């Protein structure tokens, strides 16, 4: 069994030439069974692909690289989803050209052999870029913030209002200084106003922020602004104290938003 040479481009008709050798083929998936995939080659012949397909869902078209263990089956080593739209006819022409070049190149003049190889390379590049619907990258997990007492979601990462860290103690009046000049850590996060903050709708300028689920105090708001523990001013300020909430990393979810105003 020859596994050292590069994989040969094949369709259903050409597969029988390479039993025991490494091949590559694009298959249109018909059905998936335990330990195999039944598919149709680019020249409309049935091919059985043996092995364990990837755990991700299979797309309509699938490229496999492996050993041809019979005239109509491949034991796959590499599985690659090629999407749901693929130019099978173009790939089929590539298979024919690749095999014609391999069989007849020794009888061609050097110039003709070079032209044949260049044509095959151009066609291969065209086939590999024909999928118009590449899979989009999955969105990254984001942080969410929960009330420590009842675990209700009170904010997510996109609700955060960032601020430049202040200069620490020198930003505060003498009476408010803690005596630790190196303490510039933010003890709170600041967010945009959200619908669960019932007290902001009462017309008051400043008030406590209470959890809508358990009525626990989570922070404070002031439409005129507040000073963060790092010394920076945030205006207007809707403050959630880190000691009263938990920061959690969530799986991507299109609708975790606790609703901003």
Image (tube, rainbow, N blue to C red):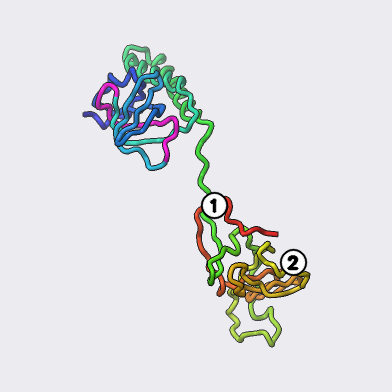
- Residue at figure coordinates x 70%, y 59% from the top left: 261
Q: Which residue is nearer to you in this view: 75 or 111?
A: 75
Lateral position of residue 120 relative to residue 71, left or right: right
162 sits to left or right of 110: right
Q: Nearer the viewer, residue 120 or 210?
A: 210
In the image, is residue 66 part of the stretch drawn in magenta? Answer: yes
**Tag 1 secondary structure:** loop
Q: Position of residue 212 (x, y in %)?
A: 62, 67
Instruction: Give how far across and how far down residue 227 sits, in percent.
Output: 69, 75
Left or right, 148 with respect to 49, comes to right
Q: Nearer the viewer, residue 66 or 73?
A: 73
Question: What residue appears at the point 28 percent right and 30 percent down from the top-left corner?
Answer: 67
Name the mark nearer the viewer: 1 or 2.
2
Q: Quadrant of the N terminus?
A: top left
Horizontal placement of 89 versus 197: left or right? left
Q: Which residue is found at the position 39% from the left and 31% from the top?
A: 63
Type of secondary structure dominating the magenta stretch: strand
**Spatial distance from mark 1 to mark 2, Cα to Cα?**
29 Å
Vertical placement of residue 33 versus 201, above or below: above
Eyeballing the image, is 233 above or below 254? below
The residue segment tinted magenta is 57-72
Q: Residue furthest left?
A: 1
At x 51%, y 63%, the residue is 248
The residue carrying pointer 1 sits among few (fewer than 14), some (14 to 19) or many (20 or more) residues within 10 Å by Cα, namely: few
Q: Residue furthest right?
A: 203
Label 2 secondary element: helix
- Percent across and percent down for residue 154 are 60, 64
Q: Which residue is mark 2?
A: 201
Q: Quadrant of residue 106?
A: top left
Q: Locate residue 19: give its quadrant.
A: top left
Residue density around tag 2, few if under 14, some if 14–19, many if 20 or more, within 10 Å: few
Q: Which residue is mark 1?
A: 253
């Amino acid at each position: 069994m020859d596994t050292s040479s590069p994989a040969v481009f094949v369709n259903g008709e050409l597969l029988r030439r390479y039993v025991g050798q490494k091949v590559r083929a694009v298959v249109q998936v018909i059905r998936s069974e335990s330990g195999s995939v039944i598919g149709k080659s680019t020249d409309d012949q049935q091919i059985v692909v043996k092995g364990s397909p990837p755990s991700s869902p299979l797309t309509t078209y699938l490229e496999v690289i492996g050993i041809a263990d019979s005239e109509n089956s491949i034991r796959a080593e590499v599985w690659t989803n090629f999407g749901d739209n693929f130019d099978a006819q173009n790939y089929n022409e590539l298979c024919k050209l690749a095999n014609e070049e391999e069989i007849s190149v020794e009888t061609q003049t050097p110039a003709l052999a070079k032209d044949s190889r260049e044509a095959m390379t151009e066609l291969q590049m065209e086939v590999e870029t024909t999928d118009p619907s590449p899979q989009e990258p999955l969105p990254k997990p984001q942080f969410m913030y929960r009330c420590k007492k009842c675990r209700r979601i009170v904010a997510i990462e996109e609700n955060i209002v960032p601020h430049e860290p202040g200069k620490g103690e020198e930003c505060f009046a003498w009476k408010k200084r803690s005596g630790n000049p190196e303490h510039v850590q933010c003890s709170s996060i600041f967010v945009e106003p959200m619908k669960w903050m019932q007290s902001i709708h009462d017309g008051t300028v400043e008030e406590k922020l209470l959890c809508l689920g358990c009525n626990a105090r989570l922070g404070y708001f002031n439409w005129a602004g507040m000073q963060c523990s790092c010394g920076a001013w945030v205006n207007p300020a809707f403050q959630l104290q880190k000691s009263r909430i938990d920061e959690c990393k969530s799986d991507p979810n299109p609708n975790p938003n606790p609703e901003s105003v």
